[in-house]
């Protein structure tokens, strides 16, 4: 009886692995989507532009006030997240260098390898923002964070292979 239970447990555990990996992908996509909602809300309520940055080489992303608008103490409410080791962040290559509307500053982005979404004080994101963030689980699955058709926010959709 105990041997039968042990054999059944081995089969259940081996088949649950993909389930838990899929949950990690879903969780990360929802956390990033929630961060876009938070960024929009915070940009409007504080009246300052916010930068949601993505570092694909370190698999990290975060949110902070655009550096030219920070107080001397820095952004005390800035956040940084690291994705699970089985996941990979991707953004389209060839994204334009982020500059202000007057092209006189680089929007506080000092590391040119970072992709970003810039939320303006009216709650919208500007045209210099990245158009797609892909979160992949190896080669088997992925989810994308993309602007909604009406450009009022972002949404999650299954990943495509096209940039």
Image (spheres, grey):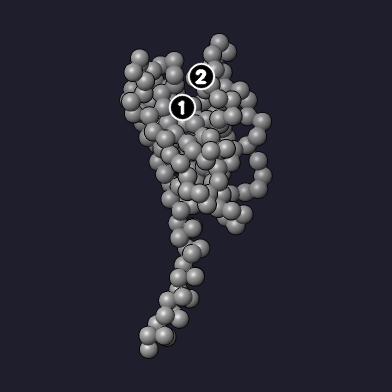
Task: Tell me if I can see residue 52 in this picture.
Answer: yes
- Which residue lies at the image location 37% right of the left edge and 20% below the top edge? 74
Q: List the single residue furthest toward the front.
A: 3
At which x and y percent is residue 114?
A: 55, 30
Q: In which quarter of the image is residue 127?
A: top right
Q: Residue 63 carries which label?
A: none
Q: Name the residue under label 2.
A: 107
> Mark on residue 51?
1
Task: Please tell me whether residue 159 is drawn above or below residue 122 in the rendered image.
Answer: below
* Closest to the observer, 142 or 6: 6
Q: Residue 61 location, x and y as percent?
A: 47, 36
Residue 41 is left or right of residue 132, and the answer is left
The residue positioned 56% from the left and 49% from the top of the image is: 136
Looking at the image, which is closer to me, 10 or 42? 10
Question: Quick check: can you spot residue 40?
Answer: no
Label 2 or label 1, whichever comes before in sequence order: 1
Q: Which residue is drawn at 45% across and 60% down?
A: 20
Pointer 2 local density, CA inside 10 Å: few below 14, some 14–19, many at least 20: many
Q: Is residue 47 above or below residue 153?
A: above
Task: Identify the secondary structure beneath mark 1.
Answer: strand
Q: Kindly state the secondary structure of the residue where label 2 is placed.
A: loop
Assess whether mark 1 and mark 2 are in contact (beta carbons under 8 angstroms): yes
Res 106 quadrant in image: top right
Q: Distance between the residues labelled 2 and 1?
A: 9 Å
């Amino acid at each position: 009886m105990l041997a039968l239970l042990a054999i059944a447990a081995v089969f259940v555990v081996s088949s649950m692995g993909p389930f838990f990996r899929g949950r990690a992908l879903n969780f990360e996509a929802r956390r990033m989507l929630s961060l876009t909602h938070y960024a929009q809300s915070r940009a409007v309520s504080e009246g300052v532009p916010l930068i949601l940055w993505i570092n694909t080489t370190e698999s990290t992303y975060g949110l902070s006030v655009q550096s030219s608008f920070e107080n001397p103490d820095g952004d005390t409410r800035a956040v940084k997240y690291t994705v699970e080791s089985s996941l990979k962040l991707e953004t389209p290559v060839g994204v334009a260098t982020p500059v202000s509307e007057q092209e006189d500053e680089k929007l506080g982005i000092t590391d040119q390898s970072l992709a970003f979404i810039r939320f303006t004080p009216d709650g919208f994101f500007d045209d210099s923002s990245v158009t797609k963030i892909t979160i992949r689980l190896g080669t088997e699955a992925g989810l994308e964070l993309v602007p909604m058709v009406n450009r009022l926010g972002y949404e999650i959709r299954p990943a495509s292979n096209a940039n």
